[in-house]
Image (spheres, rainbow, N blue to C red):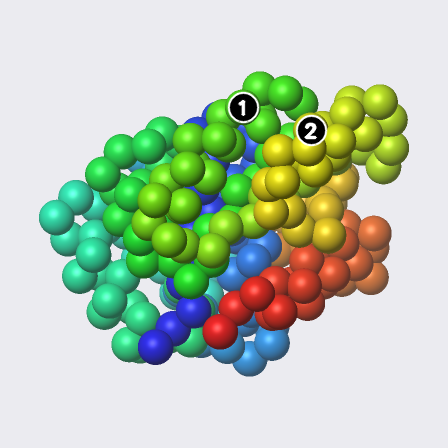
Amino acid sequence: MAIVITVAQQKGGAGKTTLAANLAVAFALAGRRVVVLDIDPQRSLARWHGLRSRHAGAVAVALSEAAGWRLAAEVDKLGRAHDVVVIDSPPQIDTDAKLAIRAASLVLVPVQPSPPDLWAAEGTLKLAADERRPVRLLLNRAPASGRLRAGIERDIAGASHPVMAAALGNRIGFASAFALGLGVLETAPKSVAGQEMRALYEELLGYLP
């Protein structure tokens, strides 16, 4: 059965879709059969995937879109045909989000280093706990240092939220790669952004079956 990673966050602008795309590329570059499942009504991940056809050297990543009553069956079907399913969930807790979290091997919640992002993550953390799914917060679009980041890190530690040791910085490389339909490990693997993504991927392997 496939690994299912559900990227979930209620607050918009946290970098959820960019994270999902880069995770898919990281697993595909490692030789896994990967599919992205876009259940966000904005369809940004599907549009990213459509751009990949312009690049002959892009690593293979499949795409699926499903919602509503078809979603659970679609995740099950994709899991039989692929090694990794990466789900970009909608930016609100609705039925589709609940089903995506229920199906997850791991729920990954990107948070920018700001109180509203952390507050918005609480609903997703609770839902993952209710569904008994493993969950990790990920600091995303984070400055290298500063009071705001330090404050959020203290808040996360104080609340005993599970958090990834790896973090992704606020780097143009992620946005540039996404705009091309690629991942940063395809466009700039040796960049700081590429190193951060590789560190995240390697840490994730320790949390996954």
Q: Percent position (x, y) of residue 195?
A: 79, 58
Q: Residue furthest left?
A: 69
User: Residue 188, can we see it?
Assistant: no
Q: Position of residue 154 (x, y in %)?
A: 75, 31
Residue drawn 29% across and 68% down? 78
Q: CA distance from mark 2 to mark 1?
A: 10 Å
The 10 Å Cα crowd at callout 1, few under 14, some 14 to 19, many 20 or more, is few
Q: Earlier in the sequence, mark 2 or mark 1?
A: 1
Q: Which mark is residue 52?
A: none
Where 6 sits versus 124, above or below? below
Image height of 116 relative to 166, above or below? above
Decide if residue 154 is in sight here.
yes
State the image coordinates of residue 186 (x, y, percent, origin top left): 67, 62
Q: Quadrant of residue 117?
A: top right
- Look at 31% across and 71% down and name the residue there: 79
Q: Give the number of the disc on residue 155.
A: 2
190 horizontally vs 49: left or right: right
Q: Residue furthest bottom?
A: 31
Name which residue lies at 60% across and 76% down: 30
Write down the quadrant of residue 184 in the picture.
bottom right
Q: Quadrant of the N terminus?
A: bottom left
Q: What is the crowding at mark 2: few (fewer than 14 residues within 10 Å), some, or many (at least 20)?
A: some
Task: Report the residue at 59% width, 55% height from top.
Answer: 22
Determine whether, in the image, residue 179 is placed left or right of residue 105.
right
Viewed as shown, does residue 186 lie left or right of 208? right
Name the residue at the top extreme: 116
Residue annotated with mark 1: 119
Callout 1 amino acid:
Trp
Q: Position of residue 126 (x, y in %)?
A: 41, 37
- Kindly state the secondary structure of the residue where label 2 is placed: helix
